[in-house]
Amino acid sequence: MRYTCCPDGTWERAAARPAPALRPGVVGYRGFRFDLARARRRLELPDFMTTLVILFGQRLSVWEAAGPGRATRSTYSSVYAGMQSRARLGEHDGRLSGVEVVIAPWAAYTLFRTPMNALANQLVEPADLLGHRFRGLDERLGLCPDWATRFALLDTTLMSWLQDGPHGSAEVLWAWRRLNRTAGRIPVHALARECGWSERHLERRFEQQLGLLPKAAARVLRLRSAVGLLSQGHNGAAAASLAGYSDQGHLSREFKGMTGWTLSRFTRTRGLAHSGPAEVDRGERRPTSLVLPD
């Protein structure tokens, strides 16, 4: 487990790998506590992973950063996010604590026993999704004496959720991994041919078990690949080419359409100081998030 905290006690964070029996479907745990003097706002890029955020008594407001739903705010006591093809903004009043579980969509299909296309580009209260299986979990986690105990409780809980859940097809899992390995650069017709299905059959099963259609998932992966390349020091033209875009302008249009931000504004703001821990991403070498400066 990794643990860091601010000397003045205004924030702390912890991270751990789930139990081996849960990996690689359950990717990681992150614990957090903020006690800041002002509100904190965060941009989350589109993601091919899903996240379960369990809060300990506070509430979080979320709205779309781009598209027709961006003016509509919803407030959650805890929240599950399926695969997302659009960026979202989240805000809290400065005081927030909880745990975040990063879950591959094929594992979420088993854990939550729900078609993933019903949850793609959606945020839901876990209690509405899981019913009695979630009841009281937020309180039990909040009462644990430390992060290690919380993560152990998550291990036990998630392993119980895995029992008797539906299992996705091997072909869909293979297609998802192939898309990941190519960072979304393989055409859907080639993906279908390689797994031995028709393109339409692959689309139907992929969407049901993972959430997005293969083409939409590939679009997210290409965007995330380009942002990662930019963070490694590549210029815009090189990042666009390596990520599979026709040119830098194509990348810029895609980024603006999916996030509501320009690439230059995003990159510039990532370098600005903000309250809370400096590290904001959910994975190493994978830019996922942006905290807006105070």
Image: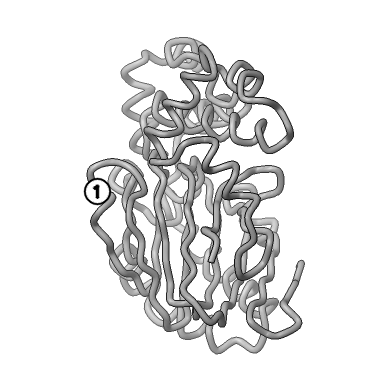
Residue at point 59% right, 29% down? Answer: 226
Quarter of the image with the N terminus is: bottom right
| Labels in figure, total | 1
The amino acid type, in three-letter code, at marker 1 is Gly
Q: In which quarter of the image is residue 278?
A: bottom right
Q: Confirm whether residue 23 shows in the render.
A: no
| Residue 80 versus residue 5 in the image, above or below | above
Q: Confirm whether residue 55 shows in the render.
A: yes
199 vs 237, nearest the viewer? 237
Residue 266 position, x and y percent, is 53, 43
37 vs 100, nearest the viewer? 37
Callout 1 secondary element: loop
Judged left or right of residue 1, residue 286 is: left
Coloration mode: one colour
Residue 45 position, x and y percent, is 48, 45
Residue at point 61% right, 45% down? Answer: 287
174 vs 227, nearest the viewer? 227
Residue 283 position, x and y percent, is 65, 50
Mark 1, Cα crowd under 10 Å, few <14 / some 14-19 / many 20+, is few
Q: In which quarter of the image is residue 144?
A: bottom right
Residue hosting label 1? 69
Residue at point 51% right, 12% down? Answer: 246
Judged left or right of residue 28, residue 2 is: right
Residue 153 position, x and y percent, is 59, 75
Residue at point 61% right, 24% down? Answer: 236
